[in-house]
Amino acid sequence: MSEQIGSLLTQYTYDANNDALLSVSSGGVTNHYSYSNDLLQSINVNDHLQYKFAYDHFGKTTANYVGNGTNWRTLSTIQYNDAGLMTKQTYGNGDYIEFSYDNLDRQTQTRYNGNNSQRVTYSYGNNGSVAQITDYYTNTNTRFVYDLANRVVSQREYTGTAMSGGALRSYTDFTYASKTNYLTGIRHYSPLGTQNIGYRYGTISKGEMPDQIYGVTWNGAEKVSYTYDPLGRLTNRKIGSFNNAYTYEDVGSDKTTTLVKSVSTPAGTYSYTYDNIGNILSVTDGIYTASYEYDSLNQLVRANDERAGKTYTYSYSNGNITEMKEYAYTTGELGEAVDTQTWQYGDGVWSDLVTQFNGIAITYDEIGNPVSVDDQELSWRGRQLTQITDGENEISYAYNGDGQRVSKTVNGEKTEYIYNGDILAGQKTGNTVLVFMYDNNGDPFGFVYSGTEYYYVKNVQNDVTAIASADGTIIANYYYDPWGRLIEITGDSSIASLNPIRYRSYYYDSETELYYLNTRYYSPKLCRFISSDNLVITVGGNVMGYNLFASCFNNPINLTDSSGNWPKWVKNAANWLNNKIVQPVKKIVQKAFKKINGTYSTGYNVSGTLGGFSFNAQIGVSVDTKGNVAIQYSYGGGVTGGSAGGSVSRYKSVTNAPNIYKLKGPSQQVGGSFGVPIYGVPVSAGGDLILMRDDELNKNYFGYSKNVGLGTPGGEMHIEWGETQTISGTEFNVYDLIDKFFIKIMED
């Protein structure tokens, strides 16, 4: 089997049953997969590196290794409890994480290295959702409040680890639109002050999409607004009082794309050209042009940078960059290199470890964390960098229980980071305070410093290329090489240096010249991450995906990786799958059922009769043709004629109600049941006709229920009245769940 995308050909081979992928080949690279008992045992990466996996008798992964086929490094080992839940993960460098659970299999604690001061505990409310999280790293506890739809409406962070009390440190309140799940407002209080963020959705009467956000307000004023074309593509993004206008590439007279042809900003107009698989071939700002070339694996192999007056070439081996040469700028034949940088990979077991860069030695621990770089020493806790020292300078980092970096101390000067959920809300360094402004996607669009608002000017790749005032006046400019190394700052260097959001909107640590990407650190000098990814993808995917250090598969021009894990193409692929397959199928199903009303319920029933009266109680799951699902219970009773007895049974019922919420409230049922011994087993069965009244719509709904189970011999007929209710917090919609799944993938 093969797949052709533009000029890129990928070939797949499968086993005789066509259910196990054996190899993937593309651009001269071939990865092989081996199995045992249908479990992936190893991945051979182009005959230069292997990953190996071990399992328990339930098929759960118990160990991950990397090596040359003979010698191995242990990346991690994993232990489970009897319920199959992970209880301990031990990294190859000896650090470990322990997990605890309650009797409902909900996680109650995460602890590092057996240290109670390095743990997080979780408690739950009556709705089954997390009620409190206590973080012993930061000596804080966060408490959550939910509405009747089980949405978080408030979270409060207090100092201390007690279940109650403590000083309020921060809070976040959430508001939602009536009759929808749309988040419309966030109020966030922290040591940075109070920020009120609002979201403006489309209005149908204005020809807008009601589920699309058209504006973002910040402390009462709209700071960001969007304009879309009929295809839903962004055509203008207004920030402050200046515009960023977008145009798109067309393919022929009857096809369109989402490839941006140009974006006009206060810093200039950026224009782009692309190859047949969407790689950027050139970008011009109206004065200077940069052009790019790629190999058969889509790795960047040449960059011609007119503004810098330089041309760069890059060489790779098995996804590892090995050489970069610098020439005088040209788009034609290369002359003599004016500079050469080299990478060497001398580890005999893990051949992706760069052991020398331009002659500078680098050593690692078992899981690929660098512990020395020339005269620098680096310390780690698991995969988290905690300290860098070189004899003259000392830099330390602290993290909370979620792995977010909460402080950085450089030679005694501490910077504290404050978050609003997963978003970096701001930072404090002594008396210097920065508050970051961010849009509905969590993407920063500016910052506030000393009461003045500054706005980011960005290109299509999301690089901060300039800082502007609210009216679009350019204050400072940044210029980067293809891998994000800062080449030049022009304009107000004090404001430019103060701002840490730079290349790809990553957070830049100027003292180390590293970008902090939430889970690890990226070096634009090394053109790769300094430590390994925490994820070994299993079967298929990009053939370059098994290099755990490479940034964006060595395609930094077109891909981004804001989380430090997988680059943005994964999200783009998920977005394509969602838009091209999942959503169309979902719409077809929704359309097919739109005019069909119906509910289906199944669960367990307890019933009995005595002295002319009957009673019953049942609980089960109800679904409808609109995709709604909930756990519902009912109880009732009435009059009966027949023998006394009782039964426990499984029931199934169908009605013509439009949705499960119409099942709530009173109902009537007429039916009967009987019990007979079959081979000595007391079997019972019964059935009822159901009648429900909808006073709101002035309608009656009908249905039928049947049950089979165990019961006393005899028979009876009955007329009953009942009441049905929904257990709060159990409701969800299948269609919404699909959307949320893909939204989660698209989050950073």
Image (cartoon, rainbow, N blue to C red):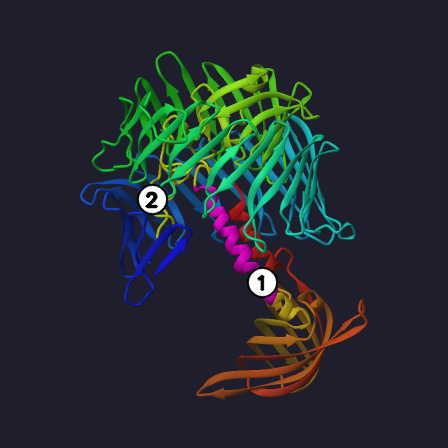
Asked if residue 460 shows in the view, the reply is no
Q: Where is residue 178 in the image (x, y as percent from the top left)?
A: 74, 51
For the residues labelled 2 and 1, the Cα–Cα distance comes to 33 Å
Note whether 664 is above or below 536 in the view shown: below
Residue 327, image x, y percentages: 36, 24
Spot occupied by residue 436 in the image (x, y as percentages of width and height): 61, 28
SS at mark 2 in the image: loop
* Dominant secondary-structure state across the stretch colored magenta: helix
Residue 237: percent from the left, percent from the top?
66, 38
- Looking at the picture, which amino acid does disc 1 mark? Lys
- Quarter of the image for residue 350 reads top left
What is the residue that sits farthest to the left in this orientation?
70
Judge left or right: residue 620 versus residue 217: left
Of residues 278 and 530, the one drawn nearer to the viewer in this rendering: 278
Label annotation for residue 586: 1
Task: Answer left or right for 227 relative to 137.
Answer: right
> In this figure, which residue is indicated by the disc labeled 2?
546
**How packed is label 1: few (under 14 Cα within 10 Å), some, or many (20 or more)?**
some
Instruction: Provide the secondary structure element on which disc 1 rests.
Output: helix
Q: What residue type is labelled 2?
A: Tyr
Height in image: 144 above or below 167?
below
Q: In which quarter of the image is the N terminus?
A: bottom left
Does 133 lie within the magenta span?
Answer: no
Residue 577 included in the magenta stretch of the image: yes
Q: Residues within 10 Å of mark 2 (few under 14, many from 20)?
A: many
Which residue is rendered at x = 56% and y = 71% of the image? 604
* Magenta segment: 566-588
Q: In this view, does 741 lie to the left or right of 206?
A: left
Residue 448 position (above or below residue 203):
above
Along the polypeptide, which appears first: circle 2 or circle 1?
2
**Residue 557 in view (yes/no):** yes
How many marks overall?
2
